[in-house]
Image: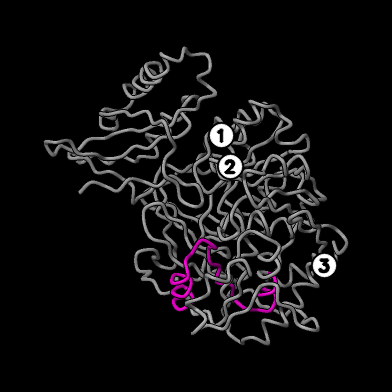
Amino acid sequence: MKTQSAEVFRKYTTPETFARIREFDSVAAMWAECVKQYADDVAIVDEGKEYTFAELERDAALLRTAIAAASDAPRVALLAANSYDFVKAFLAIATLGRCAVILPPQLDAPTVFGCCMKYGAGLLLYQPALAERTAVAESKVALLPADAAGETPTPAAEVPAEAACCVMFTGGTTGRSKGALLSNGAVMQGVVNGCYGYEDVFSQRYMLVLPLTHVFGLIRNLLTSLYTGSALFICRNTKDMFRDIAAFRPTIFVLVPALAEMALTLSRKFGRNMLGEDMKYIIAGAAPVSPYLVAEYKKLGIDLFPGYGLTESANLVSGNPESLTKPDSVGIPYPNQEFRIENGELWLKGKNMMDGYIGEDEADVYEDGWFKTGDLVRLDDEGFLYITGRIKEIIVLPSGENVSPAEVEAKFNELPFIQDSQVFEDVNEQGAHFLALEVVPRATELAGVEKDKVGAFIMAELEKVNSALPSFERVNRIVIRDSDFERTPSMKIVRYKKCN
């Protein structure tokens, strides 16, 4: 068992900046300090309009009044797309001491109703543009549009660390989503963790393209931005991303690897200014980050920092401040959490951990108070963490050998022209089980290969890697895809189902 101290991150920033990173018990306490320090600074930019911290607090305070008048329910469902409405509504709910049940905006009306019932939401706060999604819920749940406002402001409540802050859906690649209950203390630990590991933390300019209904978007992108007195530009459509970059000139981008890959491809094609001359950092997570991305962004003068987290851990478990020297690591575990490795699996305890799943059996995820992540890991001599696979994804071969698809994929992904890959178990016509591989090529790295020889070149290089693997890890079939894999809303690859 090991417990990490924040001191390990001190050397990656200035003493003055490190001293400014302080902990708060709740979103309400953090937000009060933000409004005090940054009142006249821009907090949010949405659809061409700027909102200062003071203006955001004014609007949240009027919405607090409307919420309190509409219902005394401790849990308030929030149905909104990325927008100022979402930001204002979340802050209003959290600073009132209520718990926000965060619903993805793509849910249909029956599912919105079902979630309100399952997670005990007595009030549904919705973005007016999504009013039709409330049609089924309106008979059982109080409704309130997110643009509602009381006549006078209601002050924020004093909220203890143990008070529930939000319910967020997990985003697994092989099973159905669950609702994880996060306390204010857990959320705030995730927010503070987002400040560790890089030099310039405060008063930055963030771009938001990740969904705020995902823990990475809510905590690392929105709340850490507010915490640090930074301005956040809400990009409502990724098709407009580069136009918005040119207008806003962000310094930090929080991205999933698939979006980082897309941005890199376009930047290499059209020039560094596609990302803006002010871009300094890209924070990447929610899926494995290729060392290729770290190296290529550095050539553009941008530091890319991979990390690792879970919805259950309020997003952030570790972050890598030394990505150039350890590009395949997910970094150093963040403070105020304990971790241990049992039979290769990472177990966690700590301030950042969820209070549990709502309405779900938890027997298989806890042991003696430890949360079993399901992730297989190793730790090097310098305390850096590496993900080697998922327990549920382990393939047991007829020979009895266990294969971690992620470990095998990592070997193929070392080829610069392989963007993504998936190793899986397949069955032939005779019923024999074998390992198969599908890959998505990276076209930018194949420009020098004659068009009619690309397939043969890729296949030959993949076979070289394959032949160097231990015999039980070698794949028996390779397919080069001409389209991307199916992905979850958080852009993780959807795993193929195991063979029976």
Is the residue marked by circle 1 packed among few (<14), some (14-19), or many (20+) residues within 10 Å? Answer: many
Q: State the separation of the CA atoms marked 2 and 1.
A: 8 Å
Instruction: Please say if 185 is above or below 205.
Output: below
Q: Quadrant of residue 426?
A: top left
| Segment tinted magenta in the rendering | 91-118
Residue 123 placement, left or right of 230: left
Image x and y of residue 278, in percent: 78, 38
Q: Earlier in the sequence, mark 1 or mark 3?
A: 3
Residue at x 51%, y 51% (from the top left corner): 490
Residue 350 placement, left or right of 11: left
> Is 99 colored magenta in this rendering?
yes
Mark linked to residue 327: 1
Q: Are marks 2 and 1 in contact (CB under 8 Å)?
A: yes
Image x and y of residue 413, in percent: 45, 30
Label 3 residue SS: helix
Mark linked to residue 237: none
- Observer able to see residue 11: no
Q: How is the structure coloured here? A: one colour
Label 1 residue SS: loop
Instruction: Please say if 420 is above or below 335.
Output: above
The kind of residue on which mark 2 rests is Pro
Image x and y of residue 4, in percent: 59, 54
Residue that numbered label 3 is attached to: 55
Q: State the separation of the CA atoms marked 3 and 2.
A: 34 Å
Q: Nearer the viewer, residue 263 or 203?
A: 263
- Observer able to see residue 178: yes
The kind of residue on which mark 1 rests is Pro
Q: Quadrant of residue 440?
A: top left
